Image (cartoon, helix red, strand yellow):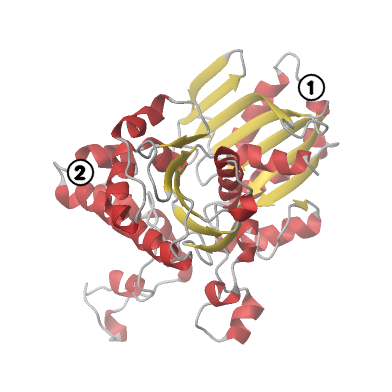
Amino acid sequence: MSLVLSVNAGSSSLKIALFRAFPENKDEPVKLLLTCSISNISTPPAEFSYKVQNGSTKQEELNDIHDHESGFSHFLDCLDAEEGVNREDITHVCHRVVHGGDYSDPVLINDEAYTHIERLSDLAPLHNGAALAVIKICLSKSKFHHAKSITFFDTAFHRSIPPHISSYAIDQKDAKSRGLKKYGFHGLSYSFILRSVADFLQKPASSLNLIVLHLGSGASACCIRQGQSLDTSMGLTPLHGLPGATRSGAIDPSLIFHYTNKAGRMSHDEGSAVHLHVTQAEHILNTEAGWKALAGTTDFGVITQKREEDPEGAGLAFDLFVDRVLNYVGSYHLKLGAQVDALVFSGGIGEHSEELRAVLAERIACLGYASISAERNAAVQGAEDIVLDVGVPEATGPRLLVCRTNEEVCSFIFLSTR
């Protein structure tokens, strides 16, 4: 009756769940015992939430949590005080790591794997470092001397993307030696969504053609053909593709140099140019762009509410996001030869923004997608189902679905069925 701990380190958040594993039960291999969520880590006070299934709930603001290491340590203190839970029973710790390079399967962490993930931190600056801070604690003999730490990579799901889609039009000798190609991210989320939608539609996952929208502070789209990733919006790093809360998304590569030009105009005069390092450019595009730059807030709910009264800020951010999402839906529809089983909304925004779903559904109706049901769409917020159909009843054409993704549980399902 072993316990499995799942850790999902975001750029400024930490989601943790503890499960009891039942490997012999293929239908329900894990049972959730408790969850913990820590947000605003980079901007204290951090918001700490700790919930025991069918038990107590703790919510508090903490100033002494200032990084992922201190946040995870506080969780362990709460866990040690929990009656009926013995840390010695934890046999596996599953870590979500955003960038895994060419790793195609989960990896048992050792010195070699740790060093490899550390090198990849430059390609996912907001995430890999945070994950490594937690992994380091778990590798400490004083914390989990008996448990195996296993990493599950967001990039692994996209290893099926063919070379003509994953390659960039640059010298391929240099590209291959340096690992410069499209990797794709949000893979654990897409794995969970594919499995859940297959169950909902009662079809084999290997038969499904899906366009999946993982829309959140970090947003991406994925084209799934016959149960495998064919294309995705993120690329070498999570920065490419759709804009997000603080990310620019896809831009002309030259923009960053003109954007920081002293004269505020295009110029090839070396005297008028700012000397910009790669790390500075990454910082600007990863943390000073996106909705934050357009609307002055990273809260898409606020943007949605204010888009009419603030057309040049919130309105621009909302319309721009819709436009960029449509770019991917249209191109993926073509890549699937118009043979699409469903368009799936997921992620914090995809699951909660009734308004965005309605606007996008209206815009893609010309492609033959089911019309959205205002009643079903409004009912998503109060429903508990993992997958919901928001199309009008008995509609023809590709389905419109909402899937409540769960990156934490996906790793256990993989682990418990192996």
Q: Nearer the viewer, mark 2 or mark 1?
A: 2
Residue 281 in sight in this render: yes
Residue 86, which numbered label? 1
Instruction: Pick the quarter of the image with the N terminus.
Output: top right
In this rendering, the answer to whether 341 lies above or below 333 is: above
Q: From this viewpoint, is residue 99 visible?
A: no
Taking the view exactly as shown, the residue that stands out farthest to the left is 309
Residue, x 62% and y 18% (percent of image)?
53
Is 406 placed left or right of 258 in the picture? right
Report x, y in % for residue 86.
79, 22
Horizontally, is 45 left or right of 357 in the view?
A: right
Residue at 22 percent across and 53 percent down: it is: 316
Q: Which residue is mark 2?
A: 307
Whole-angstrom CA distance, mark 2 to mark 1, is: 50 Å
- 418 or 224: nearer the eye? 224
The foreground one among 371 and 265 is 371
Q: Secondary structure at mark 2?
A: loop
Q: Residues within 10 Å of mark 1 (few under 14, many from 20)?
A: few
- Quadrant position of residue 328: bottom left
Q: Residue at x 59, y 67 (%)?
A: 161
Q: Is residue 70 left or right of residue 349?
A: right
Name the residue type under label 2.
Arg
